[in-house]
Image: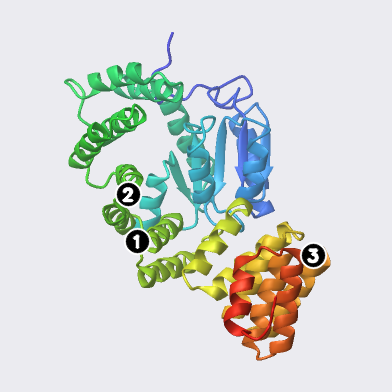
Amino acid sequence: MAQPPGTRKTSKNGGNSLFAPLSVLVVDDMPGIRRMLRQMLVLLGFGGLIGEANDGVEAWETLQIIPYDVIICDINMPRMNGLELLRLLRSTHRYETTPFLMITGEVSEEIVAVAAESEVDSYLLKPFQTASLENRLSEIIRKKLQPSGGEAIFLQAQKLKLSGRIEDALRLLEKLTKPPYKKQAKTFNLAGECVQILGDHLQAEEYYTQALEANPKYLKTYQNLAALLESKGSLEEARRYLEQAQALSPLNTERLYHLGKLCLQSGNQDLAQTYFHQCLKGGHSFSNSQLQEAAETFLQAGLSADAEKLFSQSLKEDPKNIHLYNRLGIALRQQQKHREALDCYDKALKVDPNNEKIYYNLGILFFDLGEKQKSLDAFHKALKIRPNFPEARDFVKQNFPDQHA
């Protein structure tokens, strides 16, 4: 006989049988919390693997190898926090719908907003008892495994979209816009994503507009509209939608960074700097793959000190990257940190003694210091390595008219 929804069914060992086949990854930077959660999960009857990760970076690496069924994650952690990990997971096919329970020490409107935006399934306030953990996990797992009629159709449409069956997904979504189903923002939003994949941007924009009419606080639609407008080159309109999303969910530092980039692209450097500062003040951490791009963006925005920090971090990951030494030297030079820049270029030449770009930047640095002969020597070395180096030739011609390169 089927068990009524919400009714607890126990296994032979006393645990909840719903949990028996499931594996769980516990992510928290405090070993004591991880141990406590592990003990609770065993008591509740989780029979699969119970893994641990110290932070979001370690969790992400683990999840590439082991496909856990459920994730329990703290919100505040070094390197990559819980929200950053969740956004990363929701952007992947494998973990787009994986039950994700967020653990937090506080609940504010801002945290609730950013958690909802990141599609967290539920959150639990510290400290908590085993019964509270069981209730939350039962709720989110049943929702995934035993969805209601409308929710089941929506989840099926999501799967069809992910598998590339866009037309089939749209047919299911069409059903959800008619009685007896209530019109929901997420239905129109998913329909917009589907037709956007098909290349119908006008129809996508209409669906997104309907989504916001159904729920003006549906953050994912603001993001989608901004991305659509950005792809069309409408940067100012895209920025306005992102700003509306940021007003609803102010803790999203990744969006602040993107707002800064949009402002930079549209020539608004002052506003770009404001958003970049807010991004860093909010504690945003860049992944290793993002560091170099972010450093270049900050350098372009005139934020040399911030660029210096990011280039330095990137060099720790890739200590033989001549391009990074070059760009770090420029960031240092722009801050008038001439001695540090010289040291940076010396380290670069130890890695590659015949790099013409390093000698070119050394030439500019010595010129700024008023050491004209050293400057000219550096430019000559650059041109000896690469005779057809237009920037070096132009600099010598303009600043050393009596010299022949």
Quarter of the image that includes the C terminus: bottom right
Q: In the structure shown, which secondary structural element does the residue marked by tag 1 occupy?
A: loop
What type is the residue that disc 2 sits on?
Gly
What type is the residue that disc 1 sits on?
Ser
The mark lying in front, picked from 1 and 3, is 3
* Residue holding disc 2: 233
Decide if residue 202 is on the left or right side of residue 334: left
Q: CA distance from mark 1 to mark 2?
A: 10 Å
Callout 1 touching callout 2 (CB < 8 Å): no
For residue 152, what is the image quadrant? top left
Residue 266, label in figure: 1
Q: In the structure shown, which secondary structural element does the residue marked by tag 2 occupy?
A: loop
* Residue at the bottom extreme, as displayed: 370
For residue 348, what is the image quadrant? bottom right
The colour scheme used to paint the residues is rainbow
Mark 1 is surrounded, within 10 Å at the Cα level, by few (under 14), some (14 to 19) or many (20 or more) other residues, namely some
Mark 3 is surrounded, within 10 Å at the Cα level, by few (under 14), some (14 to 19) or many (20 or more) other residues, namely some
The mark lying in front, picked from 3 and 2, is 3
Report the front residue among 143 and 152: 152
Q: In the structure shown, which secondary structural element does the residue marked by tag 3 occupy?
A: loop
Quarter of the image that includes the N terminus: top left
Mark 2 is surrounded, within 10 Å at the Cα level, by few (under 14), some (14 to 19) or many (20 or more) other residues, namely few
What type is the residue that disc 3 sits on?
Asn
Residue 354, label in figure: 3
- Rendering coords of residue 272 (x, y %): 40, 67
Decide if residue 127 is on the left or right side of residue 175: right
- Rendering coords of residue 131 (x, y %): 50, 39
Report the front residue among 370 and 325: 370
Q: CA distance from mark 3 to mark 2?
A: 41 Å
Which of the marked residues, 3 or 2, is nearer the chain's N terminus? 2
Total count of labels: 3
Decide if residue 187 is on the left or right side of residue 300: left
